[in-house]
Image: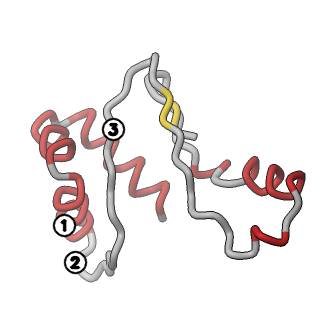
Amino acid sequence: MKNSIETTVVAKAWKDPEFKKKLLQDPNKTVNEFIKERNPKAQIGQVKFKVVECDQHTVVIAIPPAPTHSQTLDEHELEKMAAGYGQSETPYTDQCVIL
């Protein structure tokens, strides 16, 4: 679900300059309204959205919460987990890479 929301929001921001402006000014309100317009029954919960406008010289690195059992994993196991995190959810465009 995360990836489809991101993809849809980014596509709308590319096409709609007013939406993009609102998204940069107040991402939580804008994304929540956008989701509710598409699915009035959507349960958004406590999700917080952060939006960063970037260019081809910008890389945004998102650090996800550590797994609760990370205390018991050795460095090699943590690297394997980190390398696999979000591979299918990592948005990429020629303008911005979010890791």
Cα separation between marks 3 and 1: 23 Å
Residues under numbered marks 3 and 1 in contact, where contact means CB atoms less than 8 Å apart: no
Residue where numbered disc 3 is placed:
52
What percent of the width, then of the height, locates residue 76? 89, 52
* Residue in the foreground of this view, choosing between 55 and 94: 55
Circle 3 Cα neighbour tier, 10 Å, few/some/many (<14 / 14–19 / ≥20): few
Tell me the residue at 52%/47% (across/down). Answer: 62
Mark 2 or 3 closer to N-term? Answer: 2
Placement of the C terminus among the 4 image quadrants: top right
Q: Nearer the viewer, mark 3 or mark 1?
A: 3
Q: Residue 53 at x, y = what percent? A: 31, 32
Helix, strand or loop at disc 2? loop
Q: Residue at x 48, y 35 (%)?
A: 60
Q: Residue furthest front?
A: 71
Marks 2 and 3, how far apart in space?
Answer: 26 Å
Instruction: Look at 73% across and 52% down and name the residue there.
Output: 82
Q: Residues within 10 Å of mark 1 (few under 14, many from 20)?
A: few
In the displayed structure image, the side of residue 16 where residue 75 appears, left or right = right
How is colour applied across the structure in the image? secondary structure
| Three-letter code for the amino acid on which mark 1 is drawn | Glu
Quadrant in which residue 19 is drawn = top left
Type of residue at label 3? Val
Residue annotated with mark 1: 37
Nearer-N-terminus badge (3/1): 1
Q: Are marks 1 and 2 in contact (CB under 8 Å)?
A: yes
Q: Where is residue 42? Give x, y as percent.
A: 31, 78
**SS under mark 3:** loop
Q: Position of residue 61 (x, y in %)?
A: 53, 40
**Residue that label 2 marks:** 40
Q: Residue furthest top?
A: 57
Q: Amino acid at mark 2?
A: Pro
